Each structure stands twice: as C-alpha cells, then as structure tokens.
Image: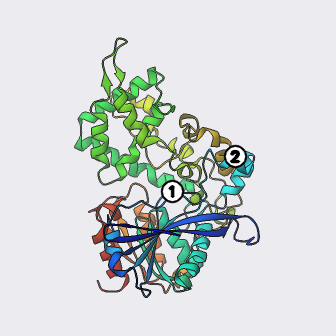
Amino acid sequence: MSTYRQPGLVLTDRRFTVPLDHDRPGGESIELYGREIVASDKADRTDLPWLLYLEGGPGFGARRFIGRQAWLGRAVQEFRVLLLDQRGTGNSTPANRQTLPLRGTPREQADYLAHFRADSIVRDCELVRREVTGGAPWTVLGQSFGGFCATHYLGAAPEGLATVLVTGGLPSLHATADEVYRAAYPRIRRKNEDHYARHPEDVERVRRIAAHLHEHRVALPGGGLLTPEAFQSLGILLGGGTGTHQLHLLLEDAFVPTPAGPALSDAFLEGVQAQLSYAGHPLYAVLHEAIYAQGPGRGHGPTDWAAERVRAEFPEFDAAKALAGEGPVLLTGETIHPWHFTTDPALRPLRETAEHLAARTDWTPLYDPARLAANEVPAAAVVYHDDMYVDTAHSLETARAIRGLRTWVTDEFEHDGVRAGGPRVLDRLLALARGEL
C-alpha cells in the first residue's frame, strides 16, 4: 500500500485479490484496485465507519477526485471512503482490446467477460469488505450502474450492508433489454425536443452535419469513423445536467472553409472524438446490454443487439428519413449498436466477442424480489424525473418493491446529480435512510 496526501485528505492505494469465478475460489484470480480516502484530521481514527462507492457504467473506474470534490467532501466528514474500480475497469485487471486477446478466442473472451456483471462485482465487494472493515457492514453509495450493483447487493448479501444509497440507479427487477430500450427511445426523443426548444438554431446545424456525413467519409483524429449514426450518438450528452450546453457549444462552429469546399473542422472532430471514443471504458459498450440479461427463466432470451432492433420501432431516429423531409435529425444516447464495433478503433477488435455476448442465453438472475420485499437494510434513492439513462417508471416500481426504501424524486438534477449537487444529494439521502426526513 502507498499513502499520499491531497489538501485535507489522506489517500491510500489498496489492492485485493479475488477469484475470477467466485464459484471456483481455487481457480484463476484477478486483482482489484481501491483508493481509500479519509479526512486528514481523522486519519488516525480506527472507529470510522466505511463507505464504499460504486461508479456508474458499466466499464468506468471510480472517479479520480482532486481534493474534496462533489459528494466526497460530505462523505469524509463521517466515513472512511473506498473508491473501488470494479473488475475490468480502471486499475482492476483492465479488460480492453489490448488485454483481452490474452484470454484466447473471441468466444473465450466472452466467457471471461460473463464474470464481469453485478453479481460478480458484489461478491468482490464482500471479500474486500471483510478485509478492510474487519467484517463490519458498510454503507454503499451506488451511482447509475453502481446502483444496479447496490440493488443486487441488497438481495444477495444484506448482512454486509449498514446502509444503501442509490443515485439515479434503481434498475427494473424484471424488464428485458428490449423493454428497457422500448422505454428509452421516447425519453431520448423528449431530450432532443427539449434541446431544440432551447437551441432552435441547432436543428439546422445538426441537419447540415448529418447531410455532410451522408455524402463524405469522415475520419476522426484517433482513427475512428464519423458516420451519421455515430454523430447521432452525441445525444448521450443530453442526459447530463450541462449536456445540452456542451452539445450546443460543440455544434456552433462545426464547419470551416477549405479549397475543396466546407469541411468539418479539426477542432470539431477533436471535440466529437472526446465524447464518442470508448478507449477509456470499452466495457460500457461490450457489456452494456448484458447488464439487463437475466436468463430465459424470466422471459429473457439473448439480448441480440436489443437497442438496434428496438430502434426500428422508432423511425423518427432514422437520419436519412429525417433529411429527406424537413424535420429535425434526432440524436441518440445510452444505446449501443453493432456499428459501434466498426467505427471505433477501441472496439473493432472486440466485435466478435460482443457478438458472442449478444447471443448468450445462460445468464443468471440478478435480483431477488422475495429478499428485497423483506429488506431490513436502511436504504434511500434519488430518482431523477425523466432520467434519460434509467427509466423513472422502472425505478419507482423497484422502489416500491424494496421494503423500507425511501425515495427522493426530483427534477432539480439530471442523471449526474450526485456530481452536480454532490454534498447536498448525499446529505439528503443519508437523512432519508436514517429516517430524519
């Protein structure tokens, strides 16, 4: 372990060894990384309760804070915090185009990645908990996909939990991937409508860019292809609190004059690449639909590129049809498609692996409705009104199914509210869970 300091904080790098397959504890192992953070004036205290943070995703390592950013400043007032890189992310045995070939064929890579869902993550957490807390239960804060993991945790190992706090991440206990995306596209359409109402000039800007991409092959600086569909996926920005403003600023100066005529500027393409590349979080794309799969016993067959298939039910997202008329080109977001694995160089080598995962049928159930209905762990969740990434109706249905869970439904923040409203969001969730509100 190495220890260092930031203003007002003491940080310690920690590493843990866990089984790849928890049902075969004597088999292959992988390494997890966690960053322990404690307030400087509490560093010597051994009685502080622990708070485990599980990042959104899937595929993102825990956020790298500088000082007491976002919710962390509130958390260290009373907790010793562990920011855990979930398996395959950050510094926890990374899984990406560079490392996965070590696993063998695409099918063998898919078999390996089948161990990287919420069920395995929670079993990792239980081993880590016993090591760092001495067996005492801890508080879990789950953001987005981290909330999916926390929901699984409540049903699978409630004895390890003192409190559960969820921000924008209560999953449906039953919905198939098809049902998830059938609920998602109308939300994405509403976010488009809100954006174009705020920035009506962007209707023509988006149409012009999409038309240009239909007529020209455009490469991004990192070697990716900016197809019309890839450009549409910039709509992922619309689910964040500042996303509509970021998108507007990105679009405002997209073209520059050149001897061959108007072209998309290097600055625009650089900005687009920063938003669309999966190089830093490839598992977001590779495992995105697998996080909804729960086996045929619950009506779940293979995910089979659900977002792509369901998109056909919403022709308003077809850019070519929009350009043939006079209406706006709608952007997408929070959906992964087969073409991602041809346009993005970080994903191209993983195309066959992703195909095997999309065809897989032997997924296990992720949630235990009976145990959740009997829950005794204090729990609270913030549910964002019309959240683009996680369906509000699904979240509220799940909230009603978890005994004792208290909700705060708000339109004050978007999906990233735990960052934007950090200390206040965490403070309110703690008060809800403790029955103080």
Residue identifier under label 2: 101
Mark 1 or 2: the one toward you: 2
Q: Amino acid at mark 1?
A: Val
* Numbered disc total: 2
Point out residue 235 in the picture as x, y percentages from the top left corner.
Answer: 39, 43
Relative height, residue 398 to residue 336 (above, below): below
Q: Amino acid at mark 2?
A: Pro
Which image quadrant is residue 382 in?
A: bottom left
Relative height, residue 285 to residue 12 (above, below): above
The answer to whether marks 1 and 2 mark residues whose Cβ atoms lie closer than 8 Å is: no
In the picture, the disc for residue 180 is 1
Could you say whether the residue bearing mark 2 is in a helix, strand or loop?
helix
Could you say whether the residue bearing mark 1 is in a helix, strand or loop?
helix
The numbered mark, 1 or 2, whose residue comes first in the sequence reads 2
Q: Residues within 10 Å of mark 1 (few under 14, many from 20)?
A: many
Q: Is 374 or 90 nearer to us in this picture?
A: 90
Relative height, residue 396 to residue 50 (above, below): above
Q: Is 408 or 22 nearer to us in this picture?
A: 22
Point out residue 339 in the picture as x, y percentages from the top left corner.
Answer: 56, 37
Side of 377 where 94 appears, left or right: right
Q: Residue at x 46, y 42 (%)?
A: 314
Which image quadrant is residue 78 in?
A: bottom left
Examine the rendering and report whether any part of residue 262 can be seen.
yes
The CA span between labels 1 and 2 is 31 Å
Q: Is 86 or 437 nearer to us in this picture?
A: 86
Q: How is the image coloured?
A: rainbow
